[in-house]
Amino acid sequence: MPTTYLEAIREGMWEEMERDPSVFLLGEDIGVYGGAFKVTAGMLDHFGERRVVDTPISESAIVGAAIGASLMGLRPVTEMQFSDFITCAYDQIVSFAAKCRYRWGAAVPIVIRAPSGGGIHGGPFHSQNPEALFTHTPGLKVVAPATAYDAKGLIKSAIRDNDPVLFFEHKALYRRIKEDLPAEEYTVPIGKAKVVREGRDLSIITYGAMVHAAMEAAGTLDSEGISVEIVDLRTLQPLDDDTILASVRKTSKVIVLHEATLSGGVGGEVSSRISERAFEHLDGPIVRIAAPDTPVPFSPPLEEAFLPNAEKIVEKARWLARY
Amino acid sequence: MPTTYLEAIREGMWEEMERDPSVFLLGEDIGVYGGAFKVTAGMLDHFGERRVVDTPISESAIVGAAIGASLMGLRPVTEMQFSDFITCAYDQIVSFAAKCRYRWGAAVPIVIRAPSGGGIHGGPFHSQNPEALFTHTPGLKVVAPATAYDAKGLIKSAIRDNDPVLFFEHKALYRRIKEDLPAEEYTVPIGKAKVVREGRDLSIITYGAMVHAAMEAAGTLDSEGISVEIVDLRTLQPLDDDTILASVRKTSKVIVLHEATLSGGVGGEVSSRISERAFEHLDGPIVRIAAPDTPVPFSPPLEEAFLPNAEKIVEKARWLARY
Amino acid sequence: MAVAAPVRLSTGGEADSEPALAHRFLYYMRLMREAEDRIERKLYRQGKIVGGVYVGRGQEAITVGAGLVAQPDDALFPSHRDMALFFLRGVHPRQVFAQYMGRVGGLTRGREGNMHMGDVKLNIVAIISAMAASVPVAAGAALAFKYRSSKNVAWCFFGDGATSRGDWHEGVNFAAVQKLPLVLICNNNQYAYSTPLEKQMACANVADRGPAYGLPSEIVDGNDVFAVHAAAQRAAAHARDGLGPYLVECKTFRMTGHSAHDPADYVPGHLWEQWGAKDPIARLERLMLEKGWADRSDLDHVESEIRREVDEAVEWAERSPYPDPSELTDDVYAPE
Amino acid sequence: MAVAAPVRLSTGGEADSEPALAHRFLYYMRLMREAEDRIERKLYRQGKIVGGVYVGRGQEAITVGAGLVAQPDDALFPSHRDMALFFLRGVHPRQVFAQYMGRVGGLTRGREGNMHMGDVKLNIVAIISAMAASVPVAAGAALAFKYRSSKNVAWCFFGDGATSRGDWHEGVNFAAVQKLPLVLICNNNQYAYSTPLEKQMACANVADRGPAYGLPSEIVDGNDVFAVHAAAQRAAAHARDGLGPYLVECKTFRMTGHSAHDPADYVPGHLWEQWGAKDPIARLERLMLEKGWADRSDLDHVESEIRREVDEAVEWAERSPYPDPSELTDDVYAPE
Ligand SMILES: Cc1ncc(C[n+]2csc(CCOP(=O)(O)OP(=O)(O)O)c2C)c(N)n1
Ligand SMILES: Cc1ncc(C[n+]2csc(CCOP(=O)(O)OP(=O)(O)O)c2C)c(N)n1
Ligand SMILES: [Mg+2]
Ligand SMILES: [Mg+2]
């Protein structure tokens, strides 16, 4: 039976909670209701109120309390109901959680789960991809899985990690993506990208839902004789420079792709690392594909125009391949 | 009599308040005390409590109240006591202020002044340069003046601007930088960079306090026969692509420099725009110089090692010039 | 007795006769109920609504009772369950349906959805999703009124759950310190999504929070539109007199799931019955019949008029075009 | 009567005899006063201190009175005016001076400055600058205690101004709902930087905020160390019994500028006199003399002993090296 992306996250948390009594959950409506997206469905029944804690509408308190509990040796996993509300907890994340280790040697092993991404007609506040709001803050790790396998393996690694980890899970993948997962236990390491498609002519470096758009585009391009390599970053901080640069050295042409808006996005960081360290290998401009610099619009035709998709990728890739 | 950078900001606000009765100030300890850095000194006496409003310790309420007042037609200028506390108002800025116009056509003409930057041994929470936390949010304008002239001209433009403007003023420049300002009124346009030094061999694209470090480095390099052009971005969102690209096309070699930490910084955005649009003109890798990815350390030897300076710039520039 | 012609624009505040007031209450409460029912129970299920749907079923007395106290120039900050505030200010149901369908005819031209709408000219400020973010913003609007020495008031509507947020605290505290003309209307419907009150706060009433800010607060039956109206008048008078903010807690119940996709299994069954019996519209109608302010046919007439108005509005909205993708990147910044 | 040998480590909570307690109070209050005086009035002016300096002059009774109630495994969340908490837990004055001088010998090895220090092994959590950010974090520590069914308590110290922040509200509310063992110690010194209380809050007392969270709160004379100690015992007992958080408001006055560079001209002159006369150390000493728990020479001896201890600690700190720049990028993340 294939496991959905959503179930994979639940399974990963479930296993870690069985394994380690210091792991517990904290968030709004995660108990009886099982979470706005039902990611934690059934966990209250199984683990009880002590380990599945429903909170008031207080994102800052949720993250703050997680920090405090972690400083006392627990491993809290928090849920933001939508990633869009993570900005309400921003100071606790970037000022408190991120800096404790450097400042006074204190570990803050917390996980912040943040359901993100568009394509569900959620409008400006239920569709954002806020990962780049966190990749400028040293001390944070930022993860964004694209597959059920990685979602499970990365949530487990995140829970075991000794630093604060932001876990951006893409809502549009929750029930759309599924695969058979190994029966035996596994984890996926934080900080390691993965070449999910080998190719010769150009590299698409991406993550999250856009991995699937890139795969679709690569299929089309393949039939046109353009061989595309796809790197799924999986972790956005710290970036896996080795995997990125190896792919660029191999193909010499790069598209950096994300669903989040263009300016100030993760793509800029990836692009600039490439131009800094693989300049001699480049046979064309580093192209970024991303959403335009606007809030996420609500109405379907606007949202469709807003989101990157296979078609838009194919078009740019053709141009770059010809370059 | 030369005017300091700090006085220039005060003068700019003062003039705008004289000119436009809808302009007023809002912040902690800005009244009787004149602000933690005395930027608003004397303004309470002159303009009265109605227009210089001391607030509780509530950054989110300060920005929120500014938004509300602006929606009713006023033009509030808020002060964050240190830019480090701007993260406490993050949701109001990126979710409320930034998106009103796009969502429902409402103008939010507010200014958020944020004293930022290191070099004063302020440690992790009194030294940060948080501008890149805001350049990923469409709808915000972000300004960071390097000179007294620009500080005055830009604060005036920010106050007149019909969108939310974040004004990052560098603490280390407050009293260190001064110049004679024109007697007559002037403004500096938001969105326009400035070539502050012409050169042939390489371009340093930078802003804020680092403009002065770049100038110092350029002097040294000049004596070695390396001619450096310096672009002061002045506005970080929206970026002035034309000025950036013109300089790159001219020199073919680029250093992007900022005091903020490297990863996820504004430099990545600038670098990737260059590699995307001026690839054919590049004769070497786009080099970024920035603080390393750590919190800002407190102790002087650590902070000195942390901050970019002329010496570090010279070294990289020599390497790039030889490339 | 004939129904007074539906007055779309509230003239606010003036001393209406009780029967006339009752008719206005009824009109707006029924219009809200009918519009929301149509959205939640029909159009949503037909797949004609874009995105999520939050309704104020059972809470109409709060929106209308307080809303009708507001002066035309007062600033309104509706919550996500206050649709009638838009009608009171003259927004046409057409625009509301178009909003929910993502059409150009909606108040946000398709940029935003459902109750996330506002109108600059009507002084209605659109909420953002983050609960309670409007509270400091409403305080700022109130500051602007004080700044200009106008007698206007900012009206901020929110739920019980929103009071847990830091923004609620900061906004109320700031307004209290500055004695700003801010009226705080809490719909305490005893749930925030699936979270019952006792998991939201450890005090018995939202009104118990007033003293923490030195501000007067009172509790009213939120299903009694006259009671809400009277409390709102006290609140507005206090605020207009320069005495600072005033908190009205309206006890009510959310007679739906959190949103259209939520069956609300977590709500104990007897609560539906208990609160269903207290429906504010049925209650108002009973009162009107009892007092002889209306007879059954008057009430039926209001209902059928509103139904026709809504039918027409839905049709209009369905004909409203979707926004053109060429508009996608407009209006992020002011035109140069 | 001989002075009891200074006991560095608080054993906490046990029923000390009043005279013995008085001696312990005195020792820690004097040590804090002397260390802070040395920093603010001497080393800072000599340019030997790196960064800003915030002291708790006049507030020592709060830190020590409450701090001595804490059990060794309780978690402490000091504010920026609670230096004695570190001494109570066994941090050596040497480490504190080294901290202020940016040396490796400081608790943060030069990464952080002044009171921004903590110690994982001693369960003292370092504040961040943002006022009140520690409140939800302390609630989380309390949650961990409840989670483990331990009888420990989290002690959160903060000023009057900090209570305006959203984090204060969210943290207290969360702790109250969850009935967490959290003791909230407010030093109400009537100013936040230059901002007097009436511009910070519209209620008369910070304790007036307790009912908003359904939690007991009391007001004590913050310059009476015995009164603070007794209130803290009530608070801790309440929290340890699983009854939830408890708020103690200690009325006091900040007998300095906000920081060493602030002349505090905004404070009306008579307040200095009025509160100077209530100095908690002088008051404790008077009591000890009156009660015959000590004579003048005992007190002088404490003072001179502490002065010697501080002299030595300063010397040690000055010999402590600065951190090596090669350490700059260490410890951002856990070692692999
Ligand atoms: C900061 C924030 N966190 C979470 C949510 C998700 N959410 C939307 S409405 C809601 C419940 C609101 O409850 P309440 O304030 O009582 O209003 P009600 O829906 O009951 O009218 C939640 C948790 C949100 N909108 N904002
Ligand atoms: C969020 C935030 N805003 C502003 C500041 C700057 N600041 C530092 S201490 C202080 C005053 C704090 O007052 P209070 O909480 O009463 O503590 P006290 O200093 O009086 O002990 C301010 C405004 C800060 N540290 N944090
Ligand atoms: Mg509710
Ligand atoms: Mg204070």
Image (cartoon, coloured by chain):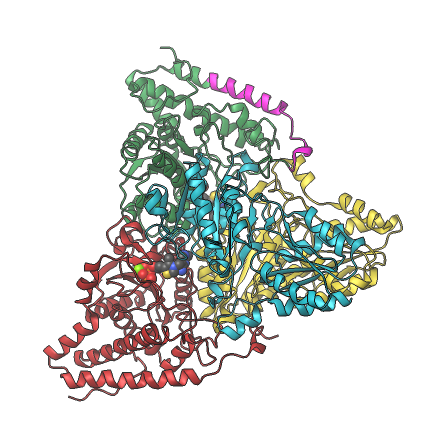
Chain colours: A yellow, B cyan, C green, D red
Residue at image location 66% in from the left, 66% down from the top:
A191
The quadrant of the image that shows the N terminus of chain A is bottom right
Task: Tell me where residue A321 appears, x and y as whole percent.
Answer: 85, 51
Q: Which of B145 and D138 lies nearest the eye of the viewer?
A: B145
> In the displayed image of the protein, which residue is found farthest to the top?
C1
Q: Count the numbered circles shown.
A: 0
Q: Which of A208 and B241 lies nearest the eye of the viewer?
A: B241
Q: In the visual, does A293 lie left or right of C153? A: right
By secondary structure, the bulk of the magenta-drawn segment is best described as helix
Q: Magenta segment: does it hold D292? A: no
Residue at image location 26% in from the left, 49% down from the top:
D203
Q: Which of D330 and C96 lies nearest the eye of the viewer?
A: D330
Does residue C196 appear in the picture of this structure?
Answer: no
Query: Where C232 sits versus D97, above or below?
Result: above
- Residue range in magenta is C304-329
Q: In the visual, does B159 lie left or right of B271? A: left
Task: Tell me where residue B164 appears, x and y as whole percent.
Answer: 52, 43
Query: Where D217 sits versus C189, above or below?
Result: below
Q: Magenta segment: does it hold C314? A: yes
Q: Quadrant of residue A203?
A: bottom right
Task: Tell me where residue A182 appears, x and y as whole percent.
Answer: 70, 64
Q: Quadrant of residue C46?
A: top right
